[in-house]
Image (cartoon, rainbow, N blue to C red):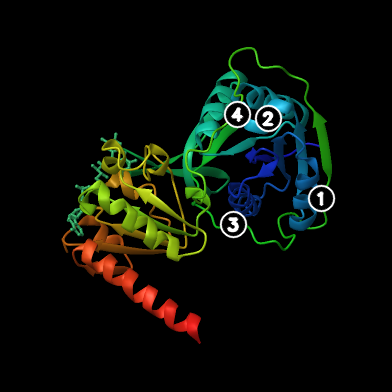
């Protein structure tokens, strides 16, 4: 079997990450341009059963690659594993998610295989058979369209650019072949022993449905607790931050949203005291509903937000919390 496009899912400790479903939606739109043969590559350790069930539920061919070092996405092993898959299935396009691992492996793989590499794509257009991929440069100030002149092209897709594919088996109807490759490879350099979660109990930023994000406008570290409590009101929520908040040590860098932080696309993004610099906006502009709480009606975030609250955020959020607690008390007594 030869595939036109391979989508490379990311997994962690035997679990397929949500970004795989965004890749599936990208792939679904991609094959409508005339590239019919697509497969989802699922690298991991003990990942084959979950990979197979995605194949069935989404009607897509699966190539599961098993290696114990892929349980924590060892980049060297991932690169060699995907190269092996490329050798077998001769794809024209290989698409990773634009994560730290995805971008590192994509560029190294392109260099190793002589393919072109276009990173951080947000969409594509079909210009009469020549595909061009849209990506941002200069911290989101400029958008460019890039095409590949090489036969083979490695892509990374910015998380949040595509909605998650719905479970209808519509990706490739009538087809769900499963190939399991036991990939026997030992990393030669460094390898990850473990990943220690920096904050237990907090939802992962890129999987949260609601993000309450703190900017410099929160004033001081003591107000982080308020932001966390507001976040706690919502299910599947997380606290985000602009870079200065992380630079000042008010929150860890794992919470930073933006071009040098995480790219997120929650259903609701509440920007508390964030001005809306291009570097921050590049990481959250695909959020479903954006709420800005800011004292400055001229702040850049205001022109992007769906709901704008021109207030001092601290008394506003304290009042919001009080009102929530009152209504919660009222309903819990009924
Ligand atoms: C190479 C590079 C990469 C970068 N990467 C990132 C990145 O990934 N993520 C990121 O966030 N930044 C990044 N930055 C920094 C970015 O340029 C901005 O400096 C940063 O986003 C600003 O953060 P902020 O909005 O919290 O602060 P500010 O720009 O200082 O804005 C604070 C906002 O709070 C409002 N405010 C003040 N007091 C209150 C109050 N009491 N109530 C309500 N509102 C109030 C103000 O009106 C203002 O709009 C990067 C910069 C560079 C050069």
Residue ID for mark 2: 70
Residue ID for mark 1: 176
Q: Earlier in the sequence, mark 1 or mark 4?
A: 1
Disc 4 crowd, CA 10 A, few/some/many (<14, 14-19, 20+): few
Q: Position of residue 76 (x, y in %)?
A: 62, 21
- Is residue 323 something that shows in the picture? yes
Q: Is residue 246 above or below residue 211?
A: above
- Is residue 149 something that shows in the picture? no
Q: Which mark is residue 164?
A: 3
Q: Earlier in the sequence, mark 3 or mark 2?
A: 2
Indicate the secondary structure of the residue bearing disc 1: loop
Q: Which mark is residue 289?
A: none
Indicate the secondary structure of the residue bearing disc 4: loop
Q: Are marks 3 and 4 in contact (CB under 8 Å)?
A: no
* Residue extending furthest toward the front: 333
Residue at point 80% right, 54% down? 56
Residue at point 52% right, 30% down? 117
The front one of 196 and 76 is 196
Q: Is mark 3 within 8 Å of ligand 1?
A: no
């Amino acid at each position: 079997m030869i595939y036109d496009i391979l989508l490379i899912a990311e997994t962690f400790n035997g679990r397929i990450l949500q970004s795989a479903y965004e890749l599936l939606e990208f792939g679904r739109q991609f094959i409508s341009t005339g590239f019919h043969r697509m497969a989802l590559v699922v690298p991991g350790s003990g990942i084959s059963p979950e990979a197979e069930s995605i194949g069935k539920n989404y009607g897509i061919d699966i190539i599961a690659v098993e290696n114990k070092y892929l349980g924590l996405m060892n980049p060297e092993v991932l690169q060699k594993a995907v190269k092996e898959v490329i050798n077998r299935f001769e794809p024209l396009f290989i698409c990773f998610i634009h994560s730290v691992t995805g971008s590192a492996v994509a560029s190294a793989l392109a260099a190793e295989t002589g393919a072109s590499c276009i990173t951080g794509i947000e969409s594509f257009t079909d210009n009469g058979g020549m595909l061009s991929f849209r990506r941002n440069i200069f911290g989101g100030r400029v958008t460019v369209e890039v095409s590949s002149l090489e036969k083979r092209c490695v892509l990374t897709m910015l998380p949040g650019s595509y909605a998650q594919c719905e479970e209808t088996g519509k990706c490739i109807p009538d087809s769900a072949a499963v190939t399991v490759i036991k990939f026997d490879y030992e990393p030669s350099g460094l390898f990850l022993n473990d990943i220690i979660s920096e904050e237990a109990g907090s939802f992962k930023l890129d999987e949260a449905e609601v993000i309450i994000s703190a900017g410099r406008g929160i004033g001081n570290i003591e107000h982080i607790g308020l932001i966390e409590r507001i976040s706690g009101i919502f299910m599947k929520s997380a606290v985000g931050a602009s870079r200065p908040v992380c630079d000042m040590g008010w929150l860890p860098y794992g919470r930073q949203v933006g071009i040098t932080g995480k790219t997120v696309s929650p259903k609701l993004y509440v920007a508390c005291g964030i001005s809306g610099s291009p570097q921050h906006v590049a990481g959250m502009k695909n959020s479903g509903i954006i709420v800005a709480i800011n004292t400055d009606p001229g702040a850049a975030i205001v022109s992007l937000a769906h709901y704008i609250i021109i207030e001092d955020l601290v008394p506003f959020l304290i009042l919001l919390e009080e009102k929530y607690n009152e209504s919660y008390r009222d309903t819990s007594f009924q």
